[in-house]
Image (tube, rainbow, N blue to C red):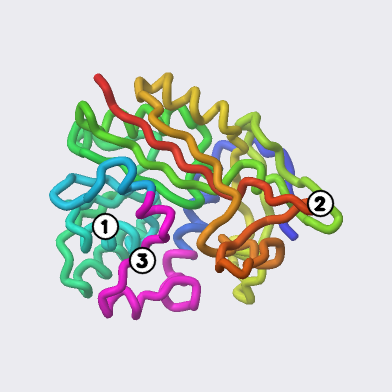
């Protein structure tokens, strides 16, 4: 079980970058991501990601798409396979280099940029029809308003932000039986987390055991989007997901193939999706 403590540190970004550098070296060589399947032609996007994108723009074919916090590029390159002109952005230099190598191996034209998602390079301003981010996004971000402002700045007028992420309520939960909460719902205060595991049930032990994460409630997230000048078109909370999202010890797969987190007999929100438009 992760250990949580309030943390006020200046090197939070470097702690987190070290973790994601290690994960970028590991992923694709373990069984968490199916790189072989991707290279064989599969699309590595969840049903929810694709459904939210269809609701936002229909087809991505011919659109300029920026994938923020893209990790080592499987999702980014999957959007390219569906016809988008893609740029992936991540703060991990290891992830960016791996993404470039993966693009070359797959024969896909894509651009990958190393940058902080809260402070995008000037040449990305107004260059995109879609900004996309999914799964494990905002808990790693100290300033959600800065993140939303960066996304809004990258969009052309009429462009759309599509964000799919884990629900902040789910992040609070340490155990389900008994129910125990170990992380705040909101507040944006940096929390130092010590854990050698990437996700629950993983046998892989990491050498980077310290990270810093931030609790952001849905109210804060929506307000940040509005403050950034985005028009919120839809906010949807989901009681199920395509997979266990790193919580295989807590979530259960139903007969319909959907994964749910049950507390005292009731499913709780495990994901949300935000779609917002740049109107300026």
**Which residue in the structure is indicated by mark 2?**
264
Quadrant of the image occupied by residue 147: top left
The magenta span reads 23-51
| Residue closer to the observer: 9 or 173 | 173
What residue is drawn where x is 45% and y is 60%?
Answer: 21
Which element type, helix, strand or loop, lies under badge 3?
loop
What residue is drawn where x is 67% and y is 36%?
Answer: 185
Q: Quadrant of the N terminus?
A: bottom right
What residue is drawn where x is 20% and y is 30%?
Answer: 156
- The reply to whether the C-beta atoms of the residues labelled 2 and 3 are less than 8 Å apart is no
Q: How far apart are marks 3 and 1 (CA)?
A: 9 Å
Q: In this view, does 269 lie above or below 228?
A: below
Which element type, helix, strand or loop, lies under badge 2?
loop
Quadrant of the image occupied by residue 131: top left
Residue located farthest toward the front when viewing the structure as drawn: 256
Task: Tell me the number on the disc at residue 44.
Answer: 3
| Residue closer to the observer: 200 or 56 | 56
Q: In this view, does 246 lie above or below 186?
A: below
Task: Say few, some or many: other residues with alpha carbon within 10 Å of mark 2 (under 14 / 14 to 19 / 20 or more).
Answer: few
What residue is drawn where x is 36% and y is 75%?
Answer: 35
């Amino acid at each position: 079980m992760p250990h949580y403590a309030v943390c006020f540190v200046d090197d939070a970004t470097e702690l987190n970058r070290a973790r994601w550098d290690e994960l970028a070296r590991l992923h694709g060589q373990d069984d968490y991501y199916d790189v072989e399947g991707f290279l064989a032609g599969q699309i590595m996007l969840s049903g929810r990601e694709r459904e939210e994108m269809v609701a936002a723009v229909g087809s991505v074919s011919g659109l300029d798409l920026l994938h923020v916090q893209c990790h080592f590029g499987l999702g980014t390159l999957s959007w390219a396979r569906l016809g988008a002109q893609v740029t992936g952005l991540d703060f991990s230099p290891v992830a960016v280099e791996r993404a470039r190598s993966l693009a070359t191996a797959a024969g896909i034209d894509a651009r990958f940029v190393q940058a902080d998602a809260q402070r995008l390079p000037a040449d990305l301003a107004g260059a995109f029809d879609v900004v996309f981010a999914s799964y494990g996004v905002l808990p790693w971000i100290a300033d959600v308003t800065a993140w939303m402002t960066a996304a809004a700045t990258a969009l052309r007028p009429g462009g759309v932000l599509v964000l799919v992420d884990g629900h902040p309520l789910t992040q609070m939960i340490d155990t389900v039986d008994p129910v125990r909460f170990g992380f705040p719902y909101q507040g944006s205060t940096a929390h130092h987390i010590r854990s050698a595991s990437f996700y629950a049930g993983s046998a892989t032990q990491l050498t980077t055991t310290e990270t810093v994460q931030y609790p952001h409630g849905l109210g804060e997230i929506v307000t940040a989007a509005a403050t950034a000048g985005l028009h919120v078109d839809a906010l949807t909370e989901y009681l199920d997901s395509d997979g266990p999202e790193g919580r295989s010890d807590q979530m259960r797969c139903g007969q319909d193939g959907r994964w749910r987190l049950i507390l005292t007999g009731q499913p709780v929100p495990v994901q949300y999706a935000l779609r917002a438009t740049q109107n300026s």
